[in-house]
Every structure is written in C-alpha cells, then in structure tokens.
Image: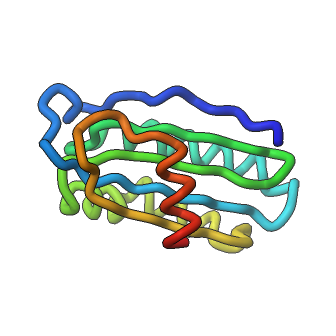
C-alpha cells in the first residue's frame, strides 16, 4: 500500500493536556478514484480547522489515494470538545458535500490511558474492533 502520512500536529489544548484525553479515529473510503482529489481537499480543510479548535490536542491524517482510503486520528480534551468540533460549520459542510462520494466509513472513540500522542497502530486495532 502506498500511503502518505501527515505528521501529528498539536492543537491548542496540547499545552495543558488532560490526564485521559478522548481519541477519535476514522477510516473513510470514497466510491471511486475521481472522488479522491475532492476528498483530500476537504480533508485538509477539516484538518486545518481541527488543529485550531478549542480542546484539540492534535490531529493526524493518512491517505492511500490509490485505495481511495483516508484515516484521521485526533485527540481531544473531553467528549464535549470533540462533539463541538463535529457540529462545527466547516465539519458539517464537508460531511454534507462528501456524503454522495462515500463508500465506507468507520469510527472508533476511546479514552486514552495517557495524554501521549495516540498511535496509528492502536487506531487501526480500534477501528478493526469497533468499525
């Protein structure tokens, strides 16, 4: 698999992380290769907003364009700040615009044991179990 990974980017809450942050992982696949460029553009917009959102500890993004698959990993101070981000205008607009292009989506959310940056291996395990 050829994948690109954007490095973990700390958010504003990273300066004072909680003991047990909330982590969210998503696996998102579009219907066809023609949807990949638009999905990537929208993903980068949402990622940019997420890394500046109140309560965000950080965000990472992986893309396997030829597999039409994208993964998001983010960490939040608490469930409320994650929910507020999901309800934000930029996120809602992107999800509405992308809904017709989506073939598959899986999500996993959990409380982390520590405030350390979450890892992709754990995200993959959780997505396989929960998604």
In which quadrant is the N terminus drawn? top right
Total residue callouts: 0
Q: Nearer the viewer, residue 100 or 118?
A: 118
Q: Position of residue 30 (x, y in %)?
A: 75, 62
Relative placement, left or right, of 72 versus 31 is: left
59 over 32 or under it: above or below? above
Which residue is pictured at 79% across the width and 45% down the height? 65
Q: Position of residue 18 (x, y in %)?
A: 13, 42
Q: Nearer the viewer, residue 87 or 74?
A: 74
Which residue is pictured at 34% across the width and 28% down the height? 10
Which residue is pictured at 54% across the width and 63% down the height? 127
In which quadrant is the C terminus drawn? bottom right
28 over 42 or under it: above or below? below
Relative placement, left or right, of 112 versus 105 is: left
| Location of residue 86 (image quadrant) | bottom left
Q: Position of residue 110 (x, y in %)?
A: 33, 61
| Location of residue 57 (image quadrant) | top left
Relative placement, left or right, of 86 versus 103 is: left
Q: Position of residue 82 (x, y in %)?
A: 28, 57
| Location of residue 83 (image quadrant) | bottom left
Which residue is pictured at 47% across the width and 55% down the height? 25
């Amino acid at each position: 698999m050829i994948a690109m990974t954007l490095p973990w980017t700390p958010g504003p809450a990273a300066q004072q992380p909680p003991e047990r942050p909330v982590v969210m992982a998503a696996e998102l696949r579009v219907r066809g290769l023609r949807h990949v460029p638009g999905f990537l553009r929208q993903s980068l917009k949402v990622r940019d907003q997420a890394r500046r959102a109140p309560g965000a500890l950080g965000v990472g993004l992986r893309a396997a364009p030829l597999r039409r698959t994208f993964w998001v990993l983010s960490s939040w101070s608490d469930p409320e700040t994650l929910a507020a981000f999901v309800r934000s205008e930029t996120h809602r607009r992107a999800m509405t615009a992308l809904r017709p292009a989506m073939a598959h989506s899986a999500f996993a959310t959990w409380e982390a044991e520590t405030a350390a940056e979450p890892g992709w291996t754990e995200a993959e395990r959780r997505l396989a179990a929960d998604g």
